[in-house]
Every structure is written in structure tokens, then in C-alpha cells.
Amino acid sequence: MQCLMFRPYAPLASWGDIAVGEDRPSHEYPGRSAVLGLVAAALGIRRDEQARLDALSASLGLAVGVYSTGRLLRDYHTSQVPSAKDMKKRPHRTRADELALPRSELNTILSRRDYRQDALCTVLLWRRVADTEFSLAAIRDALLKPQFVLYLGRKSCPLAVPLQPQLVEADSLIAAFTAAEFPPIEGLRDADQLQRIAFDSDAALPLGDVEATRFSVTRRDEPRSRARWQFSDRTEQVALFGAATEHVEAQA
């Protein structure tokens, strides 16, 4: 089966998790909505093109190979926002729009925002349906020359190296991650061994013949409505290898 693989890396990344109140946590590796957002930006799909975003989501399957979850960085953050009453009566499309008020009418809120430092993963995509405008070759070309600026979760997290998208043929997820060739990143340590693979529960490829601790988790990262920032639950399969397995067993 043909797969498309690319490696997103930046010194800082933020893979949004469920946010409640002032806490803005980050997952350890990118979820489905994060990857689809990256691909959509490369293809030039705008945020208000819901039909195309839905078609992109339906056409692609996802697996993420995690080499390092990096280190947690927590930023104590202050920002200005309009009052809740003003937010309801005056919809805004951009941050500049949101702040287009006299200074006296803005409030200051405090938040804690999480980032992952030097996290490294490889993304694997396959086509779920054949009849779609989003071929793997077209996505590869878009990742080489993206229409919009790409960043890893927040605009303060631009890519540090090219994504280096490549098409590979494989009969299992392990075979695909083994077949992909990415050069080492200078200065990045403890990121040369595959620690885990997280993949869609309906993956078209089997995991492969390898010893692993397997389990399933529920993530709310299936894009539902970009206009309303709504997401649905998704069942994700996770396979842990080597030291990652020992770490989980030690915690248990």
C-alpha cells in the first residue's frame, strides 16, 4: 500500500488537548485535527471552506510514529480580551478584530500554555477513498511548497526543518516507518528509536510483526466544525515499544 510520510519538527510545538478555564495543555504528539490542519494549510484550504475540510478528513487515514515526546514547557501568559457580553454581540474573524475596542473596554486574563520542547515524530497518511481530489502525490507537492505558512500548533512554533514528504510502499505500519528516510537533526538527542505508534482504529495497514504493548484511548480531535471549533471523539490505537513499554509498566 502506498503511504505518504513527513516529519514535522520545531524546537517548540503545542498539540492542543482539551482546554478548560485558564489551562491550555498540549498533547505529547499531534492528533488528527492538528495533522489535518497542517495538510489543509499546505493545500491552501481556507478555514471557511467547511465542505473541503470535511472531504479532506474523510479521505485520509492517520498514524503517528513518536520518537521523542520532548520536555514540557509551561508558559505563564497574560492576554487581552473583550468582555463576554461584547464577544456575543460583536462576532470577530481575526485577533485584530477582537481587540478593536478602546483600551478601557478590554479585560486581562491569565492562562497557562503548555509546549513540547524538541519533540519528534513522523506522520503517516493513507487514502481511505480512491475518488478524491486529495491524492497523496498532490499532498506531497503541497507540503513541499505550502500555500500558507505552516506552524506546529501555534504561530509562535514555526517549522525548524523542511517536512521532507515522501511516498513509500509498505504492507504494515512498522514497515512504513522503517522504509521512510529522514536525516538526523543536529543536536537532537534521544530521538533515534521509535517509542510508539498511534493510529486510527480503522487503519488500512496492520501494525506488523513486532512486540508491543497495545491499548486504545479516546481523543477528542476529530474535526467537526471549524467555525464553531467543535471536535468529536475518536478511538486511537497505541502501540508502545521497548523503553516506552517499561516506563508505562513502572508507572502501573
Image: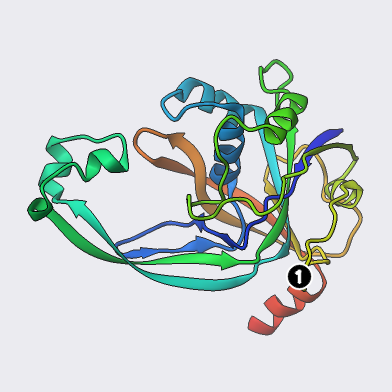
Q: How is the image coloured?
A: rainbow
Residue 12 percent across, percent down from the top left = 57, 62
- Viewer-closest of 65 and 102: 102
In the rendered structure, the answer to whether residue 182 lies left or right of residue 104 reads right
Q: What residue occupies the far left of the structure in this picture? A: 104
Above or below, 50 relative to 30: above
In the rendered structure, the answer to whether residue 87 lies left or right of residue 147 reads left
- Viewer-closest of 169 and 106: 106
Q: Secondary structure at mark 1?
A: loop
Q: How many discs mark residues in the rendered view?
A: 1
In the rendered structure, the answer to whether residue 128 lies left or right of residue 30 reads right
Residue at image location 56% in from the left, 26% down from the top: 44
- Viewer-closest of 167 and 21: 167
- Viewer-closest of 124 and 11: 11
Residue at image location 79% in from the left, 65% down from the top: 186
Residue 234 percent across, percent down from the top left = 55, 46
Q: Label 1 sits on what residue type?
A: Gly
In the rendered structure, the answer to whether residue 231 lies left or right of residue 81 reads right
Residue 252 seen in the figure: no
Quadrant of residue 74 within the rendered picture: bottom left
Q: What residue occupies the far bottom of the structure in this picture? A: 250
Which image quadrant: the N terminus? top right
Residue 250 percent across, percent down from the top left = 69, 84
Residue 145 seen in the figure: yes
Residue occupied by mark 1? 187
Quadrant of residue 185 within the rendered picture: bottom right
Residue at image location 74% in from the left, 19% down from the top: 130
Above or below, 175 relative to 12: above
Residue 190 percent across, percent down from the top left = 77, 73
Above or below, 130 relative to 204: above
